[in-house]
Amino acid sequence: MSITFEVTRKLVYPNTMALQESLNKFKQQQEKCQSTLTSIAARSASSKAPQTQRTVSPMNAPSVSTKVPTPAKFSNDTERLQHINNIRKSPVGAQIKRVIDILRETRLAYTPEQINDACYVDIMGNKAVFDSLRNNPKVNYDGKRFSFKAKHDLKGKDDLLHLIRKFPEGLPVVDVKDAYPSVMEDLQILKTQGQVWLLSNMDSQEDIVYPNDPKVALKVDDELKLLFRSIELPRDMVDIEKELQKNGMKPATNTAQRRAMAQVHGITSKPKPKKRREISRRTKLTNAHLPELFQTLNVPDS
């Protein structure tokens, strides 16, 4: 480069001023070229930057980050709106059940707006739902709010026991099972304490609760007593099994079949005579309320 400049200085530029001016122009051209190259390189880098970013992105880089990306908010909103739309398009009975379940579980009074927020049932926007809910026997409506209405207004275990004692002939459990949230637990407590009897009705397949209060006098008619005492049970087990079958019950034994099998194998079964136990003064009288058992009491001579 210096040789070129020297030749140029001797042949083309005879004086120093002209050479200096030429050098200045040459430097300006170099700076302009450098500036152009810099801008071209910058544009090229900007066009390649997204590809570079994707290659080092945590989403693509293996085992760089284990954090699960948060779903877009609009996706959750869409799913929620679809769920609400499905509820409001469901049958009236299904919507009523949702409302009654909320009222029974919370035992609170709700305005239509609060019901909409709690279970997405738009009562004011559906006249059929509003009318059905207002006329439902399980719902109380005071003109502003809806609340659950049980058959018996009970607040706790004491109220439950007081109600049961009003029904000496028995109270169906279904009538009180929705009185308040813990009513079934209190019913079991009363049974454990001996305050009530909890029995199952074989005909209706439902539980009946009876009061177990000594103050409750249960009078049995004399005719019923005579009828009970006049019934004579069959003496043969085969006849007992036949009577059970007549009443729709399945005997636990099959005496006729057992006897037939015994005859086939040549086995004869003789009933063993029962030895009557004599009762003396030394015997502990645990059945004093049955005096007929002690008519043959043997009293040894002293």
Image: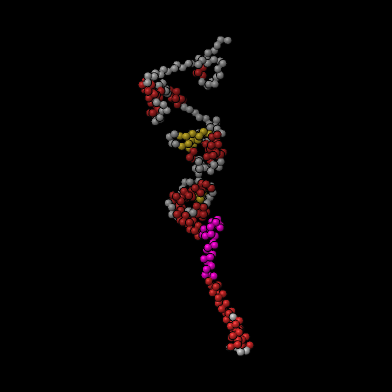
Q: Main secondary structure of the magenta part?
A: loop
User: Is 284 placed left or right of 86 in the picture?
Assistant: right
Of residues 1 and 41, the one drawn nearer to the viewer in this rendering? 1
Which residue sits at x=50%, y=44%? 150
Of residues 172 and 277, the one drawn nearer to the viewer in this rendering? 277
Which residue sits at x=47%, y=34%? 200
Question: What is the magenta range?
Answer: 45-72
Of residues 297 and 66, the one drawn nearer to the viewer in this rendering? 66
Q: Position of residue 213 (x, y in %)?
A: 54, 32
Quadrant where the C terminus is found in the figure: top right
Residue lying at the far right in this picture: please name it: 16
Which residue sits at x=40%, y=21%? 236
Residue lying at the far top in this picture: please name it: 301
Quadrant where the N terminus is found in the figure: bottom right
Q: Quadrant of residue 189?
A: top right
Which residue sits at x=37%, y=25%? 257
User: Is 188 placed left or right of 88 in the picture?
Assistant: right
- Residue 168's place in the image compared with 273, above or below, is below
Of residues 269 and 281, the one drawn nearer to the viewer in this rendering? 269
Q: Position of residue 93 (x, y in %)?
A: 44, 49
Residue 251 seen in render? yes
Let me know if residue 60 is in the magenta part: yes
- Residue 17's place in the image compared with 48, above or below, is below
Q: Position of residue 96 (x, y in %)?
A: 46, 50
Q: Position of residue 77 (x, y in %)?
A: 50, 58
Let me know if residue 69 is in the magenta part: yes
Residue lying at the far bottom in this picture: please name it: 14
- Residue 108's place in the image compared with 278, above or below, is below
